[in-house]
Image: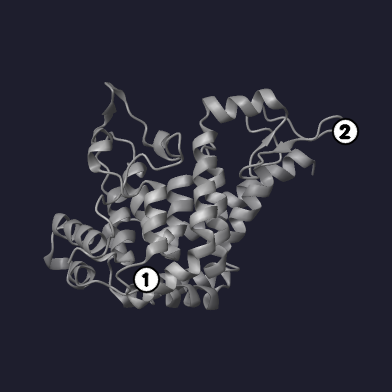
Amino acid sequence: MGRKQKLRQEKRNIKNKVAATAAAEVTTAADATTDSTEDAIVYADAAKKQGTVEVLEKAEALENQFPKSDMYFQATADTDNITGKEQYELFKQGAKEHGCVHSMYLWGKTMLAHTPDGMLMPVHLALPWFLEGAIRGSSKCMMSLMWEVYFSKADRKADALQDYWGKITKKYHSGTSLVDSMKILKCSVTRKCVICSKTDTKTLTLQQCQGCSVYCYCGEGCQAIHWEERKHRNECKQVHILNKYHKPYAKEIRDAVIRGDKEIPSLEKLRYKLGLTRPQGEYDEFFEPTHNGNPFNPRDCLTGRDDGTLWVGSFPNSPIGTQS
């Protein structure tokens, strides 16, 4: 089998592996809010198929360390007697008023699950809430960021952000098939110029982006196109923010959230630096299906603004979780 055939086969294997794992994940609000017994069965079945029972049990145990708000319990306790709208509002309240990562995760999932017919999935609206959960240490939110928001076969707009969260996730999901798949995917697609697809040869050695070390370029021309026209500048700056204000404090923030601390200075500084606290008036227009009169593609908002901050914030008042 030739090199190209092996690469194509490897990509097919990755796709099948990710699809099999994704099938075990909760993909709608209704699925996401089943009782704990059904959740346990779903995770157990997935683990048996992939031989990772212990790892998934550990991951679920880590996730359950986070406190659950009363709104979360109300939204998930009696799903037969609660409307989808009521459930949505409870998740929203739990996330905004109490900083409940479980509510953040399910609120983001609900946004993606209830996309009106004919509209593109609003990943830009779910993104800030998955990110809110991820910076607090939620493995589920990190996974959703990587595979439901950033990952795309059609474009590579957020490979560097996916790579960052893959490394952080590995601290809590070490050895799981999702992280392994991401590692294989990265190795198979990044050793070529992100613009023209040239590969290493005897006379050409690709150069990596010095900021994120994820994308490769054959020369300054392609690097300039990626930086300016493809907006890698925005993504690279967000990775820089995360490396400076999240990575060194990730464990500190996670432990504080689990303890239920109301004031977490490192978390609030990070939220501000990422643009999560920006006033809603700065992004009201992104709740509409068009932008400046033109059709709007939510994926154009994934990598942030020119300064690396998010296009859409989560909650303007700071600190979050002290509104009750």
**In what quadrant of the picture does the C terminus appear?**
bottom left
The structure residue drawn at horizontal position 28% and vertical position 60%, both measured from the top left corner, is 320
Q: Is residue 198 above or below residue 268?
A: above
Asked which quadrant contains residue 144, the reply is: bottom left
> Could you tell me which secondary element the residue under label 1 belongs to?
helix
Give coordinates of residue 222: x percent, y percent.
65, 26
Give coordinates of residue 22: x percent, y percent.
46, 57
The structure residue drawn at horizontal position 40% and vertical position 56%, both measured from the top left corner, is 269
Say the numbered circle drawn on residue 202.
2
Give coordinates of residue 318: x percent, y percent.
27, 56
Residue that label 1 marks: 257
Neighbours of disc 1 within 10 Å: few (<14), some (14-19), many (20+): many
Residue 137: in sight, yes or no?
yes
> Outermost residue, right direction?
202
Q: Nearer the viewer, mark 2 or mark 1?
A: 1
Name the kind of residue labelled 2 in the image. Lys
Name the kind of residue labelled 1 in the image. Val
The structure residue drawn at horizontal position 54% and vertical position 38%, both measured from the top left corner, is 156
Compared across the picture, whether 130 is left or right of 235 comes to: left
Of mark 2 and mark 1, the one earlier in the sequence is 2
Nearest the viewer among 102 and 148 is 102
Asked which quadrant contains residue 217, the reply is: top right
Compared across the picture, whether 297 is left or right of 244 comes to: left
Compared across the picture, whether 91 is left or right of 296 comes to: left
